[in-house]
Amino acid sequence: MRLIPLSLVLLLVGGCVAVPPPRQAPPVPPGSGGPTVLRPQAQRSVPPTLPARPPDTAFRPPEVLRAPGLDAVIRQDAASLVRRFGAPRLDVREGDMRKLQFAGRSCVLDVFLYPLREGAEPVATWAEARRPSDGQEVDRAACVQALGR
C-alpha cells in the first residue's frame, strides 16, 4: 500500500521532464556536394482531364440458368412465382432487375428477375437456395419442391 502514493508521485514528476530541442545539422560548405537548389521553372499548364466516359447503357440480355427441376421457376414472371410460393419475404428492385426471396423452414430461395428484351417484363433468370440456419448452399430444385404450394 505504501508503494501506491510513491508511484503516483513518480508519475507526476515524470510528466514534468522537458524534451530537448532537436539538433540542427552542421552547415554544409559551398561546393561540397550539399543540397541542390532548384530554380523555379516557367509555369507549365496542366493539360485538361477528359471527363469520365458514361456507362454503357445498351441493353444486354441476361444469362438464364439451365438446371433440372427449375422449370417451374425459370422464365416465370413475378405474379406466377407469388402464386406458386406465396408472398415473398423480400421484394427488391434495382433498375430493371427484381429479386424475390421466399423462405421456409428448410430453405431460403432467392429468385432474380431480369427482362429478356429491352422494355420487357422481368422474368426469373437465376435462382439460389440456402439453409436459413447457416447460409450453406442447398439443392435449388429441392428447395423449390419444399417451398411450393
Image (cartoon, rainbow, N blue to C red):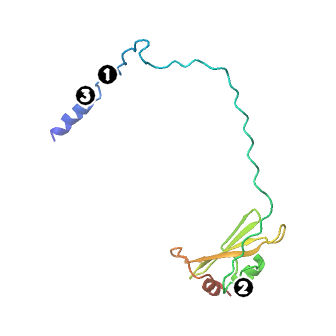
Circles 1 and 3 in contact, beta carbons < 8 Å: no
Residue 76 coordinates in the image, percent (x, y): 76, 79
Gap in angstroms between the C-alphas marked 2 and 3 = 80 Å
| Label drawn at residue 13 | 3
Answer with the quarter of the image where residue 33 lies: top left
Asked if residue 97 lies left or right of residue 106, the reply is: right
Q: Residue at x 15, y 38 (%)?
A: 2
Q: Mark 1 sits on what residue?
A: 20
For badge 1, the amino acid type reads: Pro
- In the rendered structure, which disc, 1 or 3, sits on the residue that comes first in sequence? 3
Asked if residue 121 lies left or right of residue 109, the reply is: right
Q: Residue at x 44, y 13 (%)?
A: 31
| Label drawn at residue 72 | 2
Answer with the quarter of the image where residue 122 lies: bottom right
Task: Please tell me how crowded label 3 is: few (under 14), some (14-19), or many (20+) other residues with Cα within 10 Å.
Answer: few
Residue 128 coordinates in the image, percent (x, y): 63, 75
Establish if 32 lies above or below 62. Answer: above
Task: Please tell me how crowded label 2 is: few (under 14), some (14-19), or many (20+) other residues with Cα within 10 Å.
Answer: some
